[in-house]
Image: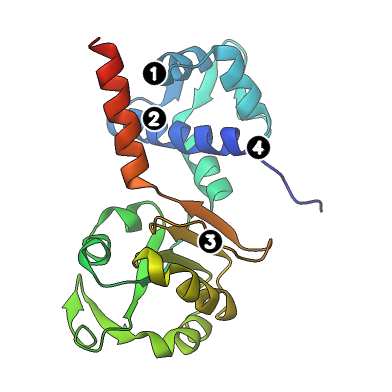
Amino acid sequence: MAKQTIPKAAALRLSLYLREVESLLEAGQTKVSSGQLAESLGLTAAQVRKDLARFGPLGRAGIGYLCPALAEQFRRILGTDQLRPVALVGAGNLGRALATYPGFERRGFKITALLDNDLRKVGRQYGGLIVQDIAKLHFVCQRDRIRLAILAVPGSAAQDVADLLVRAGIQGLLNFSPVRLDVPAAVVVSTVALSLELEQLGLAVRLRNK
């Protein structure tokens, strides 16, 4: 069976669809139309129908989509229908905040390992996780079959740690460090540039107020 490919923009919208459908379910709504989804997310109904058509016959014209079936299908496609283990490297201020954030498990991800190279932090506990020496990274990732990781280390150490993660078998990396990482093509990197996003937000507000 051929692998299903999803354009990046459509994949992002898929996550948005899931959140909207989950909100509707929490409100007691069991059906939704493409028009309703489009209006709530600032899209067109045609775009919604095109996106959903990628994943098979999820609804019928004039009837709409069943919210429980949509949510189940979206979670299956996104892989959030089961918990996936994640390694978090970096037990600084950001790392500790991420380690104690409860929302990851609700989205199908569980941080199962927190590692750092600062021996003063090793052995401390945050969010139910005990900080481990980064020297154990390869062993921990192989033992727990971890393929996803979060990188929350200073930029000066980011590439070295990324190299360790690749050698440990990590295939997907969420990078909070302010540097561009050089990794093999088989490794997927998503960079969260917090300062850049804040700069763009500040610019948008400044231009609006001119």
As shown in the figure, which amino acid type bears the numbered disc 1? Ser
Circles 3, 4 touching at the beta carbon (< 8 Å): no
Mark 1 vs mark 4: in front: 4
Which residue is found at the position 50% from the left and 86% from the top?
Answer: 138
In whole angstroms, how far apart are the C-alphas of marks 1 and 4?
Answer: 22 Å
As shown in the figure, which amino acid type bears the numbered disc 2? Glu
In whole angstroms, how far apart are the C-alphas of marks 2 and 4?
Answer: 20 Å
- Image quarter of the C terminus: top left
Which residue is found at the position 21% from the left and 83% from the top?
Answer: 121
In whole angstroms, how far apart are the C-alphas of marks 3 and 1?
Answer: 36 Å
In whole angstroms, how far apart are the C-alphas of marks 3 and 4?
Answer: 22 Å
**Residue at image mark 3:** 181
**Residue at image mark 4:** 7
Q: Secondary structure at mark 1?
A: helix
Number of residues whose C-alpha sits closer than 10 Å to that of mark 1, classed few (under 14), some (14–19) or many (20 or more): few
**Residue at image mark 2:** 20
- N-terminal label among 1 and 4: 4
Q: Position of residue 148 (x, y in %)?
A: 49, 66
84 versus 203 height, above or below: below
- N-terminal label among 3 and 2: 2
Image-quadrant location for residue 127: bottom left
**Residue at image mark 1:** 40
Image-quadrant location for residue 208: top left
As shown in the figure, which amino acid type bears the numbered disc 3? Leu
Circles 2, 1 touching at the beta carbon (< 8 Å): yes
Circles 2, 4 touching at the beta carbon (< 8 Å): no
- N-terminal label among 3 and 1: 1
Q: Position of residue 2 (x, y in %)?
A: 81, 51
Number of residues whose C-alpha sits closer than 10 Å to that of mark 2, classed few (under 14), some (14–19) or many (20 or more): some
Image-quadrant location for residue 92: bottom left
Q: Secondary structure at mark 2?
A: helix
